[in-house]
Image (cartoon, helix red, strand yellow):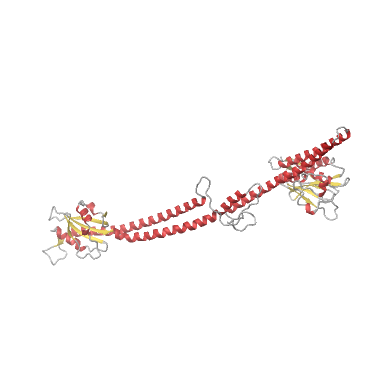
Amino acid sequence: MASTAGHGHGAAADPPETRPPGGGATVRVRLMAAVVALTATALTVAGATGLALQLRDTDARIDDSLARAVTAVRTLEAEGQPDPAAPDDPDARVPWTSLDTLLRKAVETRVPGEDEGVVALQDGVLSWRPADETGAVRLDTDRELMAWLGDVVRDDAASAPVTVATAVTEYRLVAVPVDVAAEPGTHGTVVVAFDRSALTAGVRRIFLTYSAVGLFALAVVSAVAWFVVGRMLRPVRMLRDTVRRVTESDLSERIAVLGKDDLADLAGSVNAMLDRLERAFGSQRELLDDVGHELRTPLTIVRGHLELLDPSDAADVRATQALALDELDRMQRLVDDLVTLATADRPDFVRPAPVDVGRLTDDVLEKARGLGEQRFVVVSRADVTARVDAQRITQAWLQLLANAVRFSAAGSAVRLGSEVAGGRLLLWVRDEGPGVPPEEEERIFERFHRGQADRVQHGAGLGLPIVAAIAAAHGGRVFLEHPPPGAGPGVVFVLDLPAVGLVDGASDVSLELAEPHR
């Protein structure tokens, strides 16, 4: 998701990083630190695990070779030497008579491989080493190792592989004690050792290369993550900058929404909130302007007449009093209408209850007879019970009837009716007045909007908005229709409400019109 602030602007460059209040790290830095730490941890664990497994495998191969060496020495010691009395019989064997001979034979039969060394010690002193040690390890040249071997405890446990580290290298070795019965008190040791450092050097070189590659990969991941995190957080920074630029006098800033991710939803929600705030502030400013204008006129009229009042003229006093009371009544109606609109958004603005729509229609007809000299006719009556606020619906319906009286001639017919159609409850009023100009149809439900005829009659322009607010509070709407061609002049206002809680769907239609309001 990419975004730009404001209307009509192209894509803006990424805004600079700003440190949050208190000097803490930015979200981008914290995310980067987390990504780098997790990546470094994963690379380290993987490398350390691989290195440990490779070293363990190398030690296992060394230990296997040392175990075979121990077996070979024990076998040689147990078999004995060839029988001098039967030189022609290779299977004739007798116990060893010389420890030195046994040690020499043990060294000769063990041909050391690369990175392997063999020596024999007698009473802790070097006795034999291989004649050809090409590629082998010269154990006797490592004085620290030879000193350690001279102190080896003579027991079978010494035949177990051990690791010995000296200043020269690190060894993995076995020291096999051997004895000859013919020479009691003389002790020999056959030592087979591998240069563990040399054997593991290849593994360590591989993992040094791995470490270098891992550091390079970590650097690449960090650079890419810095860029990606920056792009991901760009809508958040745009949101922050947009909110900073929003003021009570300028709510036009918006964030362009691209994509369908969570940040796009956030930007869309903020834009919707800004739309609501802009409408609310605009409505508030318009309300204050219009209220000031509407109240200023009657106050100016009253003030002007009071300034010109002749207290000694009783007729002038009575006329001024009547005019002032009339203007005060008009201001009182304006204030009452404003209070109604101000409470329209409250949950308790309407209090629905089961209402007999047919009886409500008759009651509204009776109340409408005092609105003017027009002829009021009920064209259709819905004999159903619906959940509505009877007082608010009566208020809205009478407001529509009052409008019809205001804009139609005395003696003309004003029709009203109620009906159920398409799962909706329709309450309507039709007059025979001049109608509503097409250019004003979309605005007549706006607060303080007055048509040309309404301006002449000094209306405040709040009647129809109150009707719209009552309809909206019921989950419905109010709209305007024109009679079909040939049906005569006038206009039809319809309260379209959800048919909630309807009990009976019957509708009693008057004989005056075959179709109630179309």
The x, y position of residue 312, in whole percent, is 87, 32
Residue 82 versus residue 450 in the image, above or below: below
Q: Give the left or right position of residue 12, taking residue 326 as reference.
A: left
Residue 95 can be seen, yes or no: no
Which of the 4 image quadrants contains residue 315?
top right
The x, y position of residue 329, in whole percent, is 80, 38
Q: Give the left or right position of residue 86, taking residue 330 as reference.
A: left
Which quarter of the image is occupied by the N terminus?
A: bottom right
Residue 209 versus residue 319 in the image, above or below: below
**Is 185 in front, or is 445?**
445
Q: Give the left or right position of residue 327, taking residue 110 as reference.
A: right
The x, y position of residue 121, in whole percent, is 18, 57
- Look at 47% across and 58% down and name the residue there: 221
Residue 102 can be seen, yes or no: yes
Which of the 4 image quadrants contains residue 381?
top right
Q: Residue furthest bottom?
A: 88
- Look at 85% across and 52% down and name the residue there: 489
